[in-house]
Image (spheres, rainbow, N blue to C red):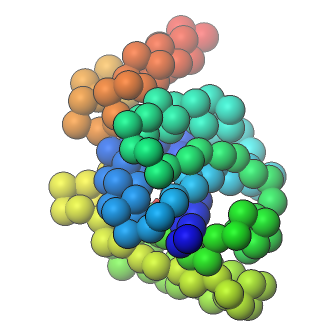
Amino acid sequence: MSIAIYPGSFDPVTLGHLDIIKRAALQFDRVIVCVMVNAEKSGGLFTPAERVDMIRRAVASIPNVEVDKSPALLAEYARERGATCVVKGLRAMSDFEKEFQMAMINRKLNPGLETVFLSARQNYTYLSSSIVKELASYQVPMEDFIPREIIPEVEEKLRRLKAH
Ligand code: ADP
């Protein structure tokens, strides 16, 4: 069985992420979307548990997708889960350098682990979790940016943040 991991911070999950998840789910028997709990990148708007919950709601209709979170090194996590592939989305050349370096490090740490890059769909190349947070804080309608299942939660979180 082919198992792929799609790792990221997903703070929050966007339609760009969801597009990569759907396309990966067509290529692999199983896709594990993993919120990587990175000690360095602590903070973030949503807790790892909230991010997992939002992704779960967005992918509920895709049977071969599972959502998890992990504080482990990606190469180790993939080994534990029996995954042979890491999926990454590439929006622009600016994503490439860092992602290529990560792919090489992961292969060094876990030689059985391949990295596959999917190119972002054109209408999502500008989309990132940071842009979503920025726009939502100005009450810009979110329909074109994040899955509809999570819109109320994201809007509510930013409203509360602004009120403080
Ligand atoms: P962000 O850069 O939005 O904070 P993450 O760290 O959660 O996102 O990204 C996880 C993965 O998803 C990375 O491989 C990233 O390149 C990819 N990705 C992020 N946004 C998009 C998008 N709009 N389209 C395609 N892939 C994306």
Residue 114 in view here = yes
Q: In the visual, does 83 lie left or right of 122?
A: right
Answer above or below: position of 16 versus 102: above
Compare residues 98 and 50 and report the one nearer the observer. 50
**Where residue 48 appears, x then y in whole percent?**
68, 38
Ligand 1 is found in the corner quadrant, namely bottom left
**Where residue 11 appears, x then y in whole percent?**
54, 41
Quadrant showing the C terminus: top right
**Where residue 65 appears, x then y in whole percent?**
49, 50
**Residue at coordinates 52% horizontally, 18% vertically from top-left?**
157
**Residue at coordinates 40% horizontally, 63% vertically from top-left?**
24
Image quadrant assignment for residue 111: bottom right
Compare residues 150 and 42 and report the one nearer the observer. 150
Q: In the visual, does 20 lie left or right of 57?
A: left
Compare residues 152 and 110 and report the one nearer the observer. 110
Answer above or below: position of 109 versus 152: below
Residue 134 in view here = no
Q: In the visual, does 14 lie left or right of 84?
A: left
